[in-house]
Image (cartoon, rainbow, N blue to C red):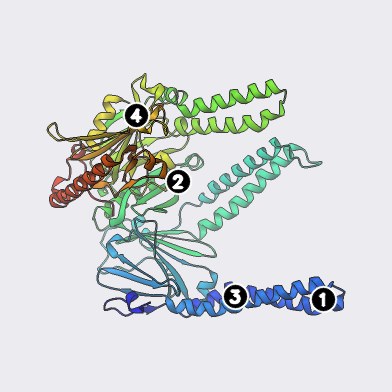
Amino acid sequence: MDASLFRPVSEPWTPVSPALATRRRLVLAAPLAVLGVVAVAGAALGPAAGVPTGWVVLLAAVAVVLLGAAAALWWWAERNRRSWGWAESQDDLLVTSGVMFRRLVVVPYGRVQFVDVEAGPVERRLGITRVTLHTASTTRPDACATGSPTSGGRTMPGSEPGGAPAAAAELRVGRRTHPLTGVVQGGLWAGAAVVGLGASFLQGDRWEGVPWWVAVLAVVGGGLVVGELAGLVSWWFTRFVVDDEELRIDSGVLTRRSRRAAFERIQSVDVAEPLLARVVGLAEVRVDLAGGDESRLVVRFLPLAEARDVRRLLLRRAHGAQGDGPDDALPDHDGGELITRVPPERTLLGALLSLDLLAAVAALVAILLAALGFGAPLVVLGGVLPALSWAAQVVARRVVAEWGFVLWRTPHGLRIERGLLSLTAQTIPYARVQGVAVVEPVLWRRLGWCRLEVDVAGRAGSDDGDLDTTLLPIADRALAAALVAELVQDAGPDDEVVTVRASRRSWPFAPVGWRFRSLSLGRRRASSTTGWLHRRTSHAPHAKVQSFALRQGPLQRLRDLATVELHTPDGPVDVDVHHVDAAQARGVVLRAVDVARDERAQTATVGSASAGRVLGAGVDGADEVP
C-alpha cells in the first residue's frame, strides 16, 4: 500500500507522545505479564505440592499464552503509537492512524461542534490527554496529544469590558454548581435502591431474620449515604466556564474530562426543573448542539433565577454579543405569541384513547383471564406487573410529562413549556426543524385530533427521547395543518405534484395496509403516508433530505416491486413508501434527486435574504444540517 496516500498535502505530521506506548504497556501488557508469571510459578511449584500432572500442564499452557500475549501487546503498543499523527491545515484537521488498516480522517474546522479533552490518572501521570472532536455525524476522529489537561478559564486577547457583574466575571474563571446538587443525586440513588428492593420482594426474595421495614430503612439509608458521597465528590470536581469564545464543562474524579462548545455552535439553550431539583429550588441548563450523539451539554444544578441568567448569557453569546453587561441588558427570549394551550383533560383523554394504553390494558385482561381459566393465580404476578409497568410508562410519558403543554411563537423558534412534576421549557429553532410528522391514531381520528412530531437536528440521541421531538401532543386538524404549512412550506397551487402509491401486487406483504401507503413529491417538500390503525403522514423539505435510496429484496424482485426512501436526520419523520412498482420507483427517486438539487441551489442563492419568512418572524428553515 502506498504510504503517501495517507500523507497531508503540505503540512508535516505531528506524532503523538511516546508516552502513549508506555500507557498502553502499563494498562494492557503489564497485567497479562503479572498473571503469566503467577501461572509459571504455579506450574513450577505444582509437582512439589502434589498438584496433578494435568493441572500443571494446563498452568504451563496458560502461562505461555499470557506471556506471549503480553509480549505481543508490548510490541504492538509502540508500533501502533508510531502510526498515529495529526496535522493542521488552514481549513482542516487531519488525523491518521492504523497499521494493517490505514485510516486518514479530514475534519473541516467549520464542522466541529464541540471538543472533549479527557485524561485518567495514568494519563495525567504521563502528561498526555485524549482529544475527541464531535461533528454532526456519529463518527469522530480522536488522537492522543502531549500535555496535561488545561484548567481554569481561557485568556482571551483584549481587555475585559468594564462594569461586568460579579457573577458573569466568575463564570470566566469557572465555578461549581450549587452544593445541593449532591443532595439531589443522593435522592436519585435512594429512589433506585427502593425500586430494586421492591422488585426483589415481589419476586419472593427476603432477608432471613430481618423485618421488612428494617430492610427498607437500610436500603434507603445506604442509598442516601452512598448517593450523597458520590454526588458531593462529583460536584466538587465539576466546574463550568463561560468565556468570550466557548462554554466548557470540566468534570471527573479519576478520569478528568473537559467538554468544550463554541458559542456559534449552540443551537438552543433550555432550562429544566426535574422533580427533586424543583423541590429545593434548583434547575439545570441544557445546551443543545448539532453534534449527533452526545450533542447535549448539561449544567446541573443551579438556582432557578441563576439558571435563567446563564441561559440568557449563553443566548447572548450565541447570537454574537460580546461582553457581559448588566443583567437587564441580556435578551430574554421567553416571551412571544401564544399559539395554543393543551387542556389537561384533553391530555388525559388522549392518553386513555391511545393505542399504547389500550394494548397494555388488553394484555392485562388477557393475563387475568388466562390465570383464572387455567387455575394458575401465580401466573398473574409474572404477567400483571409488566403490563402495569407498561401502562404506567404510557401514563407518565403522555400525561405527567405533557401536562400543561403550552406552545409559543418567538422570534428565534417555537417555545414549549410542559410538565406536571418536572417542569421543562425548551426552544426549537426554526432552522433546526428537518421535517414534521402528523400522527393520527384510529380513535383520535373520530374526534378530529392528531399529534405533531418534528425532526430536530441534534435531538435524536437526547435523554428525553421522543418528548424532545413532540411539537404538539394533541391538536385539531386545522391547527396542525397551519403549523405544518408554516414549518414545511407546501407547493403552490400551480406546482406539479407527483404521487406514487403502493402496488396492488404488494397485498401479500400488507393485506390491509398497502392501500394506505403513498409518497408525494411537490416543488418544496416530500410527503408520505402509511398506516391504517396508526396513520402517520411525514413531511420533509427537499433541501433537508440527506440522501436517497431505492431498495429491492428478493421477494420484492419476484413481484417486480421496490421501496423508495428519502433519508432525513434521525427522528420520528420517515419519508418513504414500500412496495411500489419497480419501474415507477426508479423514476420517483431520480425526480426526487433533481428536485432536491434544485432546492439546495436555490437555498444557497437566496441565503439569508429569506430569513424571517417562516412563522412570520423566524429564521428560514432551509439551511442544511452542519
Residue that carries the numbered disc 3 in the rendered image: 29
Q: Nearer the viewer, mark 4 or mark 1?
A: 4
Q: Nearer the viewer, mark 2 or mark 1?
A: 1
Above or below: residue 394 compared with residue 329: above
Q: Nearer the viewer, mark 4 or mark 3?
A: 4
Q: Residues within 10 Å of mark 4 (few under 14, many from 20)?
A: some
Quarter placement of the N terminus: bottom left
Which structural element holds mark 3? helix
Along the line of sight, the residue nearer the viewer: 263 or 352: 352
- Residue 473 appears in the figure: no
Q: Residues within 10 Å of mark 3 (few under 14, many from 20)?
A: many
The percent position of residue 559, horizontal first and vertical second, equals: 37, 38
The percent position of residue 326, horizontal first and vertical second, equals: 27, 52
Q: Quadrant of residue 371?
A: top right
Q: Which mark is residue 444?
A: none
Q: Viewed as shown, does residue 146 lie left or right of 383?
A: left
Q: Nearer the viewer, mark 3 or mark 1?
A: 1
Residue that carries the numbered disc 2 in the rendered image: 463
Q: Earlier in the sequence, mark 3 or mark 1?
A: 3
Q: Give the spatial CA distance, label 4 vs label 1.
A: 75 Å
Q: Which mark is residue 46?
A: 1
Q: Residue at x 66, y 48 (%)?
A: 222
Q: Earlier in the sequence, mark 4 or mark 1?
A: 1
